[in-house]
């Protein structure tokens, strides 16, 4: 997947519209509590501004306003934070389409303009052609740097690319390179670590990667459906009853392909999922009154031994309920271990990225994906509409 990027474009005296992912968390006072996504877009913004652009128009969604104007989901806090980070004026507009917006952009003396929340218009998520065309009419070049929404065919991610020259920003390019090119030709041994709550979320990933990987490590809540499919007792642990047969099929398919699937051999358990509960370490068979909340010490050592000689590691899904410190040991130990290896380490977005950030290990990973759902679909081998719509290199 070789897509044109901002390096392939002459921006001199051009007006550019860029899709960013500024969907940041806000507190009750509407202060941004984590500006990671804004910082991730800065290299692309700075590059465009430094290359003679006439005007750069930024657009994003925030939250789920469902086609309604909601004052608490306006992008004003984003504009304020952007100004602080860039040391440059940002003009924030009160809508994203319409005659008034066009006039305000044309008359503005400021180079950097931020449109209002795209999802105040239901036409954004519905990918209405007229709405996409209106967004396109504001500029001469379209840049997509919002990997977190690239799996959605929305007006600002897919529709607009049919009306303007459309290229990737640095962040999107990085995701394509790591999640795409690395997985096409991974350095071997290639180990996949899967966790999180549900087997159903990861079936597509397993189906796609089982043909490329050497070993698959399974932890988190999804592990207990696999253990149940082997006839093991899992107590009150997370179980998807309707996925037991699928888990069994996956294990059989892996055996046929000589891909080793490793499951927990001991577990950290509690009677009830509360941070103050006393924890117990039990083996593969979990008593009926207990819930598994993390992998145990023997499993941690077993997984480390499997990972020790890996040259490519893809990790999607924590090993336990990492938000609670006493249930985070498995995820933390695995994160620390892989961060010390001479391997390409790719962290799928969402909870896994949050766990790695909690442990302060972001800088020690090769790549941390900025998109939860998008990275999952990429790992499944699906074509992401926001990437497909961009111009190919010849």
Image (cartoon, rainbow, N blue to C red):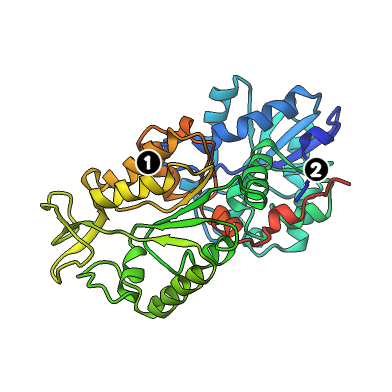
Q: Is residue 67 above or below residue 30?
A: below
- Point 46% across, 57% down: residue: 216
Q: Determine the CA span between mark 2 and mark 1.
A: 38 Å
- Point 61% across, 56% down: residue: 378
Estimate the x, y position of residue 76 in percent, counting from the top left: 53, 37
For residue 273, side relative to residue 278 (left or right) = right
Q: Closer to us: mark 2 or mark 1? A: 2
Find residue 384 and name its label.
Answer: none
Visible residue check, residue 114: yes
Indicate the secondary structure of the residue bearing disc 2.
loop
- Point 65% across, 58% down: residue: 124
For residue 270, side relative to residue 342 (left or right) = left
Count residues near mark 2 (Cα–Cα under 10 Å), then give few for <14, some for 14-19, many for 20+.
many
Viewer-closest of 92 and 364: 364
Find residue 27 and name its label.
Answer: 1
- Residue reaching furthest top? 87
- Residue tagged by mark 2? 4
């Amino acid at each position: 997947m070789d897509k044109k990027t901002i390096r392939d474009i002459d921006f001199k005296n051009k007006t550019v519209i860029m899709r960013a992912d500024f969907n940041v968390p806000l507190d009750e006072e509407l202060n941004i509590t984590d500006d990671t996504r804004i910082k991730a877009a800065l290299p692309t913004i700075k590059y465009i501004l430094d290359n003679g652009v006439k005007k750069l128009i930024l657009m994003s969604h925030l939250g789920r306003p469902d086609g309604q104007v909601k004052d608490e989901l306006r992008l004003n806090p984003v504009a304020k934070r952007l100004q602080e980070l860039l040391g440059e004026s940002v003009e924030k507009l009160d809508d994203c389409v319409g005659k008034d917006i066009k006039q305000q952009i044309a008359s503005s003396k400021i180079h950097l303009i931020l449109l209002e929340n795209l999802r105040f218009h239901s036409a954004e998520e519905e990918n209405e052609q007229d709405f996409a065309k209106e967004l396109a009419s504001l500029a001469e070049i379209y840049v997509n740097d919002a990997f977190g929404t690239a799996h959605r065919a929305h007006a600002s991610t897919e529709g607009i690319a049919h009306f303007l020259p459309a290229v990737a920003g640095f962040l999107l390019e990085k995701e394509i390179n790591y999640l795409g090119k690395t997985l096409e030709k991974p350095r071997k041994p290639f180990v996949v670590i899967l966790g999180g709550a549900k087997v159903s979320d990861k079936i597509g990933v397993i189906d796609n990667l089982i043909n490329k990987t050497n070993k698959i490590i399974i932890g988190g809540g999804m592990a207990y459906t696999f253990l149940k499919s082997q006839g093991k007792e899992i107590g009150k642990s997370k179980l998807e009853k309707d996925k037991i047969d699928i888990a069994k099929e996956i294990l059989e398919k892996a055996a046929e392909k000589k891909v080793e699937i490793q499951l927990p051999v001991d577990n950290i358990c509690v009677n009830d999922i509360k941070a103050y509960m006393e924890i117990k370490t039990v083996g593969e068979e979990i008593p009926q009154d207990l819930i598994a909340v993390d992998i145990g010490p023997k499993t941690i050592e077993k997984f480390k031994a499997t990972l020790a000689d890996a040259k490519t590691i893809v990790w999607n899904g924590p090993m336990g309920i990492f938000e609670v410190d006493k249930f985070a040991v498995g995820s933390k130990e695995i994160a620390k271990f892989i961060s010390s290896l001479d391997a390409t380490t790719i962290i799928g977005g969402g909870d896994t990225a949050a766990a790695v950030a909690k442990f302060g290990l972001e800088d020690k990973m090769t790549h941390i994906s900025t998109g939860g759902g998008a990275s999952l679909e990429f790992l499944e081998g699906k074509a992401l509409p926001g990437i497909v719509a961009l111009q190919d290199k010849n």
